Image (cartoon, rainbow, N blue to C red):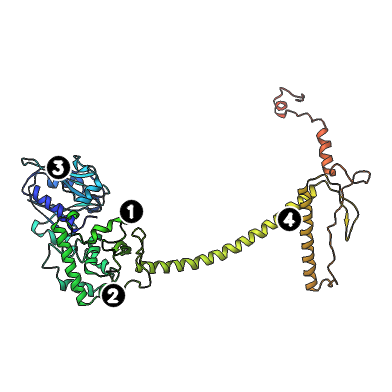
Amino acid sequence: MPEIAEVARVTHFLRLHLVGKKIVKALAPDDINVFGKVGTSGHAFQKAVTGKKVVGAGSQGKYFWILLESPPHPVMHLGMTGWIHIRGEQTGYTRYLEKIKGAEEQWPPRFWKFQLETDSNPQVEVAFTDSRRFGRIRLVDCPGEDIRKYSPLVENGPDPVVDKNLFTEDYLKQKMRSRHVPIKALLLDQAVISGIGNWVGDEIMYQAKLHPEVYCDEFDDEDISTLYKATKYVCDTAVEHLGDSEKFPEHWLFNHRWGKGKKNSATTLPNGEKIAFLTVGGRTSCIVPSVQKIKGKATDLDVEEETEAPEKRTESKFFEAKSKMQDAASGNRGKAASKKAGSSVQETIKKEVEDDDTVVSTKVKSSRRVVVKEEGNETGKSTTTGSTKRKAAEEEAETGTESKLNGRKKLRQSKGDEPAQPGPARVTKKRVAVKNAEGKPAANGTKKTKQIKDKMKEPPKPVQNHGARRSGRLSGKTVE
């Protein structure tokens, strides 16, 4: 996201090319995000700027604006990917140009949200682009000299570069002593200080040799003074070079922090000190643990930081502690759910076992075996016509039946309904063989099967067409 230095760069080019010129043409197709979410529209913007002379341009933190000869005035925020382009001028900084890969030469540029043309000679053409549409363009109806007294600028804190008389060491000390948040989260709060984003905040903490997770009210006066000087130094230097990273000092962390997650990227500084990444306030932070020591209370001192490779992410100690509490709570819910699921599984297994016994019993009954068993004796032998599977099924069914009978017998004995036996008696299932008309065992299946076969041999009965009979056309006739 463009921060204080990138916004200063955009403002610089607007002052250089647009101030003092009259806008004769404006194009602004409506966008419900860029215009609509701040209460305006592309048509309203186009109407407000056309025919107006630009008398000034300014910035505060991440906001910048164009002052017209009469209100309303456009106030803009670049969001994540917003930028100002001027035809024939390279307004982009080095890293931005690497991302767009030569699109600077195309006109109008891709993803443009408005275009302006002046009446000057040579003519100046300006365009605002935003591919991800997180940028915002609004109209503020107020006198130009009072624009910072109106929303959204009035809700933002002082700019460390523009508001040197407001951003003082005493101001910073008062804000730090009145809050209890990680120090980097305080620096990123635009209501406290305008313009500091992720990379500027990391650079400030590195130059001050302070850990970003330490609570802001834990620092002593000496640390606060060091932090204030580092803030002034980083912001002034970045704005002075208009965000051009090629001109940043070589010892800055900025030059080595962009390799996270990339192959063959550096994991250490040139002097051998390791680089680590963690999350503070929901933002990825780059630190050098050997330089930025923890002093006082931090979010969670028990969590080790990742220093092996920058691509491995280490969660903030504050948010890791919170995640552990959530995991513990979800673990308890998981145990209860597992217990409930366990009982359901047991019931399902029990039901499946009963169903298996029923299926096996049915298979045994349908097999072509004639066995007569009395209690304790076998009076007949089986005539096997089935397969090995049927034999196994029969043995399994008999074993299951025997176990059930033994269980019922023991239950009756425990209740006193039946006297205990001296030893386990073998209990066999009594089966009645199917006999034919002569009283001999049926050799070719059961009586029911024979009846079905005899029935199938009978000739089919004629079907009468009752509908035709009622109509009188085929009355008395039989349809075969």
Label number found at residue 87: 3
For the point 27% across and 61% down, the residue is 269
The residue to which callout 2 is attached is 295
Q: Do the residues labelled 1 and 3 touch (CB within 8 Å)?
A: no
Of the residues tagged 1 and 3, which is closer to the observer?
Answer: 1
CB contact under 8 Å: marks 3 and 2: no
How far across and how far down the image is residue 15, in percent? 9, 51
Vertical relation: 330 (above or below) 438: below
Mark 4 vs 2: CB contact within 8 A:
no
Q: How far apart are marks 1 and 3 (CA)?
A: 37 Å
Q: What residue type is labelled 4?
A: Asp
Of mark 3 and mark 4, the one earlier in the sequence is 3
Residue at the image position 53 percent from the left and 64 percent from the top: 337
Query: In the depicted view, which residue is nearer to us: 177 or 299?
Result: 299
Q: In the structure shown, which secondary structural element does the residue marked by tag 1 occupy?
A: loop
Q: Say if mark 3 contacts mark 4, CB within 8 Å.
A: no
Residue topped by disc 1: 264
Which residue sits at x=19%, y=65%?
193
In this view, the mark in front (1 or 4):
1
Measured in 3D between alpha carbons, the distance from the residue under mark 4 to the one under mark 2, in whole angstroms, is 71 Å
Query: Element at badge 2?
Result: loop
| Distance Cα–Cα, label 3 vs label 2 | 51 Å
Q: Which amino acid, by three-letter code, is at mark 2? A: Lys
Question: Are the residues at dot 1 and dot 2 in contact (C-beta closer than 8 Å)?
Answer: no
Q: Where is residue 224 in the image (x, y as percent from the top left)?
A: 20, 73
Measure the C-alpha gap from mark 3 to mark 4.
85 Å
